[in-house]
Every structure is written in structure tokens, then in C-alpha cells.
Amino acid sequence: MRLNPRTLLRGMPFRARLAAAFCTLFLLTGAALLAFVVLLARYGTAQQVKGIAITKADAPGGSGFPGEFPSGYARATDPNATRPSLDATGDDIALIRQIDQTVQAVQDTALRQMVLWSAVGLLFMALLAGLLGWWLAGRALRPVAAMTEATRRISEQNLHQRLALTGPDDELHRLADTFDTMLDRLEKSFESQRRFVANASHELRTPLAAQRTSLEVGLADPLPEGLAAVREDLLETNREAEQLITALLLLARSDRGLEETETVNLSAAAMLVAAELAPQAEEEQLDVAVTADRPLTVLGDPVLLRHLLTNLIRNAIQYNHPGGRVRVRLEDRTLTVTNTGPTVPADRVPDLFEPFRRLTQDRTSTTGHGLGLSLVRSIAEAHGTRATAEPGRQGGLTVTVRFP
């Protein structure tokens, strides 16, 4: 399979690409500089050699050369004299040619050695430049890594945190300021939403309580025939509205995070919740069992954790079939609630954790407001964990919460 260089480069981390760019740039500029120096050296040497001529002169002893030059050596004369004198013999011409070949060989050898060792040095320096580029890229990208870590820690639970990047007013500083401005807008939006839910819930609880009292007093026994059923329907509607408002208050409270925490015995709380919901389970002919290898204690809000258990067990009882079962198990800091019931498609499981979302076509009961599992997820996130669910092979659902 032929590799595409562009695809290979895209798969490399940015720091590695930056270091490779430093190394390649140094290698190309060094190679260009080396080629320039070699060409100039060769041209300059050739020009100098053209200015050297070999002449024959009388020397003592009939050697044919001056006494100060031993036999076989050359002497530089006028640069404009490009060839020997006309009275040179054949031996002199051969000697001159030999000396010229020797000079050319020395020149070529020197150039080859210079090119060889320059290339070795260039490769070594390119490798060194790549390592230095890797180090410099890490130094330059250190603020980006700090921004990435800070962004990972920021969620809807701690939107008050900011990147707060220090240093000169450069591109990275302006990017961090842009992130902080975006977080300011997000925090205001989340706070506005939470404040609206909390205030609306508080404002609605009072008239609902007054409405329930009016119904109980105004429609007290004895009642004309037919009004008793109407009173029960009105009171049931009133109770459902109060439960919805209470759930919204809990959702807003858990979204704000935990203000105070304490040690909570989750095993004992699960048994108490199961006992409270036992009449509803008996009415549906369900078998509810709570098992724990040893007491499970977690650090959190006891009220919110109790509502987490209540919503999980009530949801397992409510969406079940007569004669089914509910199993609550606490083991290794993990809470698991499993029930029988209708089959839940795997692709619809994430919808169960969204507020006011119910799979009415798949579930037998039409009661409830669709806030049970969304409350469980919000409370779990407030305690630094998350709730997951998966459908059972024979129907029903398994919800797991792993506490840190």
C-alpha cells in the first residue's frame, strides 16, 4: 500500500510537525548554502590555477630549473602567461602536464572531502535542529496545553472557573480571553435557567398547596352523588403537580452542585427506600430485594442521594410487569438497579435520561413526568460520577452508578 505524505503528515501531532518543519527548513537552507560554497570554491580554484604557469630556466648543474627550485617543482610567473616558453622540450611539457593533473586531482579531492564532511555535519546539525525544534515547540505550546487542561476541568458544575492565562498580549492570550468571555456568557445563561426553574417552582408550590386545601375543605364529605370522584381526580392532579414541582426543584438544586457534603451510608438508605416503596411493589406483585456485601459509604448530600435511590427504585417498580422483580445491589462502590419489564431498544436508552422524555410506546405505565432518570443523572454528576443504563436481554433495564 502506497503511503501518501500528506496523509502521514496530517496524522502526526502538531508538535511533531513543527519540529519536522524546523528540521526540514534547516536541512534545505544548509544544503543550499553548501552547494553555493562548493560552486564558489570550485570556480575560484579554477581561476587561480589558470594563473599558474610552469617555465624552464637555467639552473646550476644543467637541471634546467633555477637553483632555488629542486628538480620537478614549478614556479609561478606572470599571470598572463598561460603556456610555457617555446624552447621547452618534450620532457618539460610532460612534466608540466603531470603537475597540472596533480593540482586538478588535489582540487577534486579537496572538494569531495569538503562536500562529504559538510554533508555529514549538515545532517547532524539538522537532527540537532529537529530536537531543538521539538523542545521549542513544547515551550511554545505550553500555554495551549494549560488551556486544554483547564477547559477539560470546566463543566456546567464549575462554570465560574476561568483560563486566566498570563503573559504578553499575543495570539494565545487573546484566544484565552475569548474562551473566558464565552464562559461568562455560558455561566450567565446557566444561572438564568436555574434561577428561573427554582423561582418558578417556589412560586407555584404556594398556590398548589392553597388549591389542595380548598379542595379538601370545599369538597368535604358529605358530597352529592358524583362529586366524590371529581374531588379525587382534582386531588390526584394536584398531587402530581406538586411532585413535578418538587422534582424541578431537586433538578435545579443538583445542577448547582454540592454546597455541603457528609458521609452517607448508601446501603442503609437503599433498604429504607425499598421499605417505603414496598406497598407499591406489593400492589404490582413485584419482588424487590436489596443486597450488599458490606456497607457502602459515600461522601455527598444525603437528601440528594436519597432522592437518587428513590427515583431509581420507583422507576424500576413503575415500569415493570406484574409478577416481575427488582434487584438493588451495592458492591465495590457501585450501585446497580435491575428490573424486569418491557423491552427497551438500545438506541432509545439515552433518551431516558432527558427531562420529560418517556418511551410511552414501549412502557406499560403512563404515569410520571419523565424526570426520574434525568434527576438520577443530575444528582450523579453533582457527586462526580455518572449514571449509565443498558437494556436487559429479557426486557427491563439495568442502571449503574459508580461512585468515586
Image (cartoon, rainbow, N blue to C red):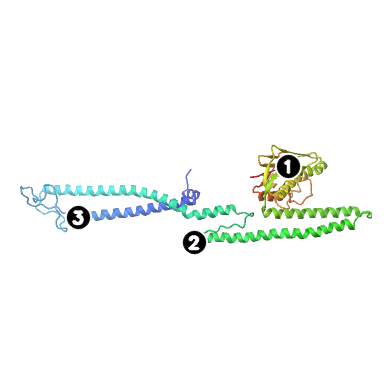
Q: Which mark is residue 268?
A: 1
Q: Are marks 3 and 2 in contact (CB under 8 Å)?
A: no
Disc 2 crowd, CA 10 A, few/some/many (<14, 14-19, 20+): few
Q: Which mark is residue 191?
A: none
Residue 184 image offset from top left, x and y in percent: 61, 61
Vertical arrangement, residue 63 with respect to residue 172, above or below: above
Amino acid at pointer 3: Lys
Residue nearest the viewer, comparing 103 with 69: 69
Counting residues from the start of the chain, the first of labels 3 and 1 encountered is 3
Q: Which mark is residue 170?
A: 2
Look at mark 3 in the image and give the residue it sits on: 50
Counting residues from the start of the chain, the first of labels 3 and 2 encountered is 3
Counting residues from the start of the chain, the first of labels 1 and 2 encountered is 2
Q: Secondary structure at mark 1?
A: helix
Residue 323 image offset from top left, x and y in percent: 80, 38
Q: Residue at x 23, y 54 (%)?
A: 46
Query: Alpha-carbon distance for marks 3 and 1?
Result: 105 Å
Disc 1 crowd, CA 10 A, few/some/many (<14, 14-19, 20+): some
Q: Residue at x 25, y 48 (%)?
A: 110
- The image quadrant that residue 392 belongs to is top right
